[in-house]
Amino acid sequence: MNGTDPMGMGLPLIGSYDVGRYVECDMCGADLTEDTRTGGFIFSGKGTGPCCAVRVMASIRGYGEEEYIQGTCTPGMAFADWIRKIRSQVPGGSTVRIYGSKP
Ligand SMILES: [Zn+2]
């Protein structure tokens, strides 16, 4: 492991782990790994599950922030499967990296 944080704050990488199949809604933290509902989208890097899609979309429209929607779930595909498909297309896509000061 090496490199510094992508935010450009110069923080060292202090840990990483592979999330595997695990998918959660970044808005409410719901575990959607085995959830079969379709819907949801990625907004500003946050996976927004079908549980929060309607509420968050209303907020996005209210603020005119549609340009920050980076992808929308394939119709009929489970949100979790869609997220896993995106991860599989990105090297290290299922790896979470943690940056910060060393303890
Ligand atoms: Zn949610």
Image (spheres, rainbow, N blue to C red):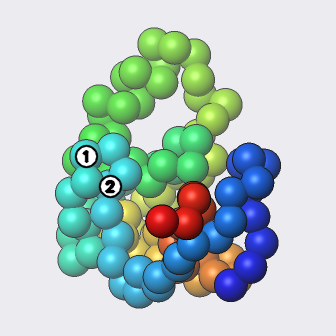
Rendering coords of residue 33 (x, y %): 27, 75
Rendering coords of residue 54 (x, y %): 30, 34
With 102 as the anchor, is 77 left or right in this view?
Answer: left
What SS does tag 2 mark? loop
Which image quarter is the N terminus in?
Answer: bottom right
Q: Which mark is residue 8?
A: none
Rendering coords of residue 47 (x, y %): 44, 53
Residue 87 in view (yes/no)? no
Asked if 28 appears above or below 87 in the picture, the reply is: above
Circle 2 packing at 10 Å, graded few (<14), some (14-19), many (20+), is many
Label 2 beta carbon less than 8 Å to ligand 1: yes
For image coordinates 74% across by 79% down, the residue present is: 2
With 22 as the anchor, is 3 left or right in this view?
Answer: right
As shown in the figure, which amino acid type bears the numbered disc 2?
Cys
The image quarter containing residue 12 is bottom right
Q: Which mark is residue 28?
A: 1
For image coordinates 48% across by 24% down, the residue present is: 60
Label 1 beta carbon less than 8 Å to ligand 1: yes
Q: Nearer the viewer, residue 103 or 26?
A: 103
Which residue is denoted by mark 2 in the rendering?
25
Asked if 85 appears above or below 12 in the picture, the reply is: below
For image coordinates 76% across by 54% down, the residue present is: 10
Residue 72 in view (yes/no)? yes
Asked if 77 appears above or below 101 in the picture, the reply is: below
Q: Are marks 2 and 1 in contact (CB under 8 Å)?
A: yes
Q: Nearer the viewer, residue 46 or 34?
A: 46
How far apart, in angstroms, are the residues tagged by discs 2 and 1? 6 Å
What SS does tag 1 mark? loop
As shown in the figure, which amino acid type bears the numbered disc 1?
Cys
The image quarter containing residue 13 is bottom right
The image quarter containing residue 35 is bottom left
For image coordinates 21% across by 57% down, the residue present is: 30
